[in-house]
Amino acid sequence: MSPDGPDDLDEEAELSDTWMAGRAEAAAETPHGGGEATAAASSATDPGHGDAPLGHCPGDRSLGRRPGDTSLGHRPGDASLGRQRETLSPGEAPPGSSGHVRPLVAASWRRSARAHVSPDGAARVELDEDELAAYRDGHPLASAMPVIRELMGAYATDGEHLLAVCDAAGRMLWVEGHPATLRKARGMNFVAGARWSEAAAGTNAPGTALAVDRPVQVVAAEHFRHPVRAWTCAAAPVHDPRSGRVLGAVDITGGRRLAHPHSLGFVQAVARAAESQLALLGPVPEAGRLSLSALGRDEALLSTGDRRVRLSRRHSEILVLLAHRPEGIGGEELLTLLYENESVTPVTLRAELSRLRALLGPDLLRSRPYRLAGGVDADFAAVDRRLASGAVAAAAGEYAGPLLPASLAPGVVRLRERLADRLRAALVERGDPGLLADWAYSVWGEDDLVVWRALCAAVPASRLAPVRARLDSLEAELSAGATVLQRLGPHTRR
């Protein structure tokens, strides 16, 4: 899907400024225009021909809200809140955009500011050469690199661009391409081993593509950080072809010549080719065995053989509970596990199960008690098994987010909280700064005070400053009156 289309995180057509208003202006009305900018061209200076600044970047401040808007949340006690609205001048935007900010970019800026990304900072290099070599050799995307290089290598070198591949946490595993462009990219730490997730490095194509799980192009001044505004990039997420889990992203980065819609289509095609390669090299699924992916998804994905079905929220909840209880669940118990409202009748549940049976087929869903026929490979169960065996790093790598995060079904809520709490406790006990950072910089861990404290204690002194700043901000919010629910951790976040 093109990033120029409507974004489900921000329904506004456009913003005529960078909406970086301070708390004192929260009640002020933000003006809007009537059209949407496109990224068809860029006024950026080509990295291969000088790094002239491209204008002003939004500051590292929390964001103002329009009257009645609660989507950004209140951040009490944040002394860094700005007081002056900053505008995006026409000279900073791609030609023809009238200075307006695309909804996808605006939503990304909001998330970047909320994560306290410094607009003048640089990405952090988290893996040294030895750590990087060991990690990427065992990463699933390693087997797709021959195809990625075949499709992108010559294009990147001849065009003075870079091809890059990162993991699901935004850490760069491979950065290759034109030698001169590689040297220039080192100036902003666009190198293998550095973390370019959106929460750590602000708006950028690979980080934002991972955040929204779709192909993204970011042109020049659309980047959140000043040092990156001389560049243009396009990236697409790569998924496990069996489970649908995000494995990482493939990216093309360079100068203004990449500011073209074809760049986005190209990188999306490469990502699909990588997924096809992974499917060819992967194990053949056992006949009749189900695969259920429900971590980090409000609607689960069910796979059986070559068939993949995206389930409704209620059907997702039913299958998660049945996968957790392979011996089966009686009707009355299943009713209490699914519905908060005790007045819901068994007739309602039977109707849902009837619709689910029609979707799956009579051979997969059985009754008396309700159960799934055959084996079920559920992603949340795999994480649980990893934790039980002490494989904390493997469990963290397979954890794609909270279990059905929007679900309020009592049985699902208990499973979600239990799994998140177990993994979180294991990470804190292990004290590995890399694993803790993966959690802390994720969507579900960005406000997790316990993990940020553990990360602050574990991170080397050379990387301490940004972690300490984020922890101080979270603790200031807590002391200023943040509620207990805001600090409980990942399973309370939507």
Image: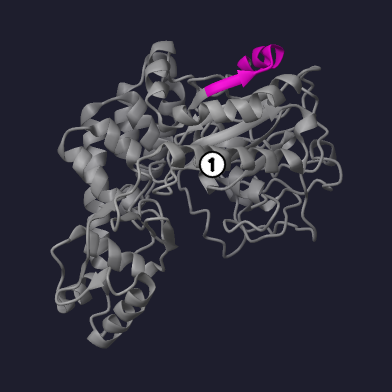
Q: Is residue 377 magenta?
A: no
Query: Which residue does the image show at 16% across and 70% down from the upper left?
Result: 329
Between residue 218 and residue 129, name the one nearer to us.
129
Q: Which residues are magenta?
A: 174-186
Residue underneath mark 1: 237
> Can the viewer see residue 296?
yes
**Above or below, comparing residue 375 to residue 151 in the picture:** below
Q: Position of residue 51 (x, y in %)?
A: 76, 19
**Above or below, comparing residue 306 to residue 356 in the picture:** above
Magenta stretch, main secondary structure class? helix
> Can the viewer see residue 79?
no
Residue 415 found in image quarter: bottom left
Chosen colour scheme? one colour
Q: Answer left or right for 406 relative to 146.
A: left
Q: Position of residue 191 (x, y in %)?
A: 56, 19
> How many labels, in total?
1
Residue 284 found in image quarter: top left
Q: Answer left or right for 246 relative to 332.
A: right
Query: Could you say whether the residue bearing mark 1 is in a helix, strand or loop?
Result: strand
Quadrant for the C terminus, please.
bottom left
